[in-house]
Structures are given as C-alpha cells and as structure tokens.
Amino acid sequence: MIVETEAYAPDDPASHSYRGRTPRNAAMFGPAGHLYVYRSHGIHWCANVVCEEDGIGAAVLLRALEPTAGLARMRERRGLEDVRLLCAGPGRLAEALGITGAHDGLPLDRPPFELLAASGSIAIETTTRVGITRAGNLPWRYVLAGSSFPSRPRPRAVR
DNA sequence: GTATTGATCTTCT
DNA sequence: GAAGATCAATACA
C-alpha cells in the first residue's frame, strides 16, 4: 500500500524532466501509467509513475509504502527483518519490490505490475518535499494520514 | 539522540 | 570536475 509520494513537473527545477529529455529520463515523457526508473547516486534505483502523455515530462515519485504482502520476499531482497525499513524510502522501496532499470518504461497496468485504487475514502497530508536541494518549498509531498510507514517518521509537518 | 561520510552513475557546468 | 529526487555505517553528544 503506497503511503508516500512526491510530484515532479516539467517546469520544476528539482525534476529530472526540467532540462529536457535525455536517454535516462526518456520514460518520464510518457505515456502515462508507465514506470520511470532511474539510478540515484550510482547505487540505488528509484521508481516513478508517469502521469502525462508523450512529450510532457511529469511523474510521481514513490517514496514509501506499507508492506502488506510478500513480506518474506522483501526481506530476502533487502536483507533486513524490520518491516518499517523494508520500503521506507525511494531506494528501499525499489529494492524491496525488485524494481531495476530493466523495468524502466514498462506499463503499470500489466504483469508483472498491478496498481489498484484505494478502497473507500482516505486522508492525505501535504508537506514539503524531501531529499532535494531545489524548489524544496513546494508542498508536493503527499503522505497517507496516520500511517507509521513513511520515510520520515516525523516530517517537519508544514501542512 | 544527531551529524558526517562513502558508495559510484548520469548529467551538467 | 561537481552535484544529485539515497542509504547505511560510523562518529560524536
């Protein structure tokens, strides 16, 4: 269950698409509903959901999720026991799910992926983004209210 | 408990 | 040559 995301737009200085299309971020430019995977600091993979059609360059970064199934497999991949550390962070999330550059550009509505809408109404908290050095004031981080699984236990909640 | 730093790829200056 | 949408080990209070 996804509990934390961040938005990145084409005219956003912190976004990879800000300076145009490159071989690495090509998947970010569409089509929507596909996965954009990039390598961070040389050693981690980070997963985004593309949310605009061809040529735009907007996506939502999956920052954290609450493990509800496949716990054993996640622990295997991460080499950790603590459930709260399995997916609490972009790099951790990607590793726990087994997402790598090989999944870059794949559609999320077909196997091996399946993306389901939340059931019922849910409360979302809005805070400033984390882990970036530009445009850090934009309130584009979205966290499931009341969840204890986001990557920052106590975000300096700006609301 | 908080602060600092290494690992190491892609893009930018 | 430097920085970055990161993580985790180590150092310090």
Image (cartoon, coloured by chain):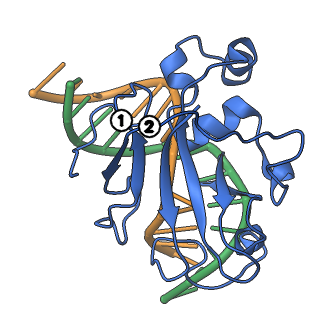
Chain colours: A blue, B green, C orange
Q: Which residue is mark 2?
A: A122
A151 on left or right of A16 = left
In the rendered structure, find residue A145 and report the number of the disc placed on it: 1
Q: Position of residue A122 (x, y in %)?
A: 44, 37
Estimate how packed mark 2 is, as few (under 14), some (14 to 19) or many (20 or more) residues with alpha carbons within 10 Å. Answer: few
Q: Is residue A96 above or below residue A56?
A: above
Q: Amino acid at mark 1?
A: Ala
Q: Position of residue B10 (x, y in %)?
A: 71, 69
Q: Are marks 2 and 1 on the same chain?
A: yes
The mark lying in front, picked from 2 and 1, is 2
How many labels, in total? 2
Q: Position of residue A10 (x, y in %)?
A: 55, 80
C3 on left or right of B4 = right
- Residue at screen point 80% across, 57% down: A104
In the image shown, does A143 or A87 lie closer to the viewer? A143
Looking at the rendered structure, the secondary structure element under dot 1 is loop
Q: Amino acid at mark 2?
A: Ile
Outermost residue, right side: A111
A50 on left or right of A110 = left
The chain carrying label 2 is A
- Residue at screen point 70% across, 39% down: A116
- Residue at screen point 20% across, 51% down: A158
Looking at the rendered structure, the secondary structure element under dot 2 is loop
For the N terminus of chain A, the quadrant is top right
A49 on left or right of A105 = left
State yes or no: discs 2 and 1 in contact (Cβ < 8 Å).
yes
